[in-house]
Amino acid sequence: MQYYTVILIIMSLMLGASAFAEKLKIPSPIFLIVVGMVLGFIPAMPLMDLNPEVVMLLFLPPLLYDAAFNISFKDFRTHISTISTLAIGLVFITTAGIAIVAYCLIPSLTWPVAFVLGATLSATDAVAAIGITKGLGLSHRTVSILEGESLVNDASALVAYRFAVAAVTGVAFVWWDALLDFVLVLTGGFLIGRIISKLLEKVLYYFRDNDMLVISLTLLMPFVTYLVAEHFDVSGVIAVVVLGLQMSRLSKSNFPEALKQRSRHFWDVIIFLLNGLIFVLIGLEFPWILRKIHETHIWHYIGIAAIITVATFIIRWAHVYLQQRSLRKSYMGKYRWRRVSKDALLDSQTSLIIAWAGMRGIVSLAIALGLPLYLDNDAPFPMRNEIIFIAISVVLLSLLGQGITLPWVVKKAREWNKPTVVSEERYELE
């Protein structure tokens, strides 16, 4: 009974904090994290030891499905080069970059464990970025790229994490085997998503006059799709994304307008509640893991988390601007093997916002909490508590640091955009 009371308290505080954040013009995710942290330090509050599998299953499928359902497939295809380099290439580069930084800063850290930490923090959370910039008038291009990145980067991070943990447990790493497994995981997820979406399409068409059944099935199937894909050891993330894209196409062509409106209102409520709970839970986890770290090491690890946060931002910033230059060269015909349309180009404003929006979130939290307790030989997983503490600290620092400053960056980027566009047009003419 106690836990039901705690859940009701958390839900009530989340709703109240969201309302106050909107009135005070404060980014809702930031306010909710602070509320969660304050709530977690209350002595009467029981420790929230979250089950990572439950967290992944509860939050990922509906959030990914909703993002995939609402993204324009045309925009996704237009920006596929930028999305893929952020969601795949940057994830692995960030994994390596964090591993190198952590290995240099923590003497007792081995390379495999360093790569576990890197994989844990390699994926960004576009949910936080979109939530923080809501109402700031982000361009459609920026939103499409951020949402498109979030649809794929979770799968890349989970694959990197799987191989890093395997290396810690003593499994030999073979790069071509890892590459093959990565392709199979993504391909398998794609196929399961396609199969389930085709079956669901037939069922929905048969019961198309039953609005409640149609809406209920669209809520249930993301969870079913995710579980089926994970059961076959392929990407549940990709499977749910494919399902969302297919259902979006089906909805536009076959669903009556009244059904689309009712479904939209229903999903708006679900996503609002899940987004709010995510950030409250992130705040609640910090006091819990803080109690597991020796007092003399707390500030040392917070400092390491701060350095990793800065390092991930620099890596992302450099990668985004290299992608901007690469797209422009391709558009101007400098690469014969690659052609991009003018719509796919990135301006300086978009690049700055995308680079600044690379915050860590619920996926990093769930991956960190999902670290195994023991190795195959029953030895404790090395530095498990330290990895979780650093990961949660990086999540909080990135959300609070970049999150608080992101609205200001968006406004400044908009002010700087006009002269930037002129210079880019001159560059094209030259």
Image (cartoon, rainbow, N blue to C red):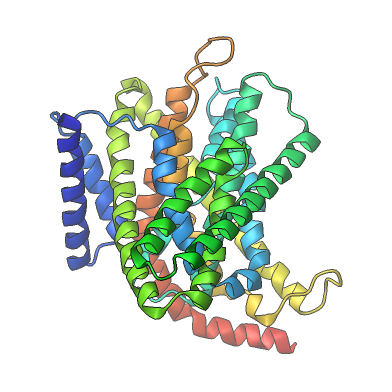
Which residue occupies the extreme front position in the image? 206
The residue under the point 29% across, 24% down is 291
Left or right: 134, with 182 as reference point: left
Q: Position of residue 170 (x, y in %)?
A: 67, 18
The residue under the point 73% across, 75% down is 340
Q: How many marks can you see?
A: 0
Q: Is residue 102 visible?
A: yes
Front residue of this view, candidates 83 and 413: 83
Left or right: 199, with 34 as reference point: right
Front residue of this view, candidates 171 and 274: 274
Q: Is residue 359 visible?
A: no
Instruction: State which quadrant residue 260 falls in.
Output: bottom left
Vertical relation: 19 (above or below) 185:
below
Instruction: State which quadrant residue 271 falls in.
Output: bottom left
Front residue of this view, candidates 156 and 233: 233
Vertical relation: 300 (above or below) 265:
above
The residue under the point 40% across, 37% down is 54
Left or right: 107, with 393 as reference point: right
Vertical relation: 293 (above or below) 344:
above
Q: Position of residue 361 (x, y in %)?
A: 42, 47
Q: Position of residue 122 (x, y in %)?
A: 55, 44
Identify the image quadrant of the C terminus: bottom right
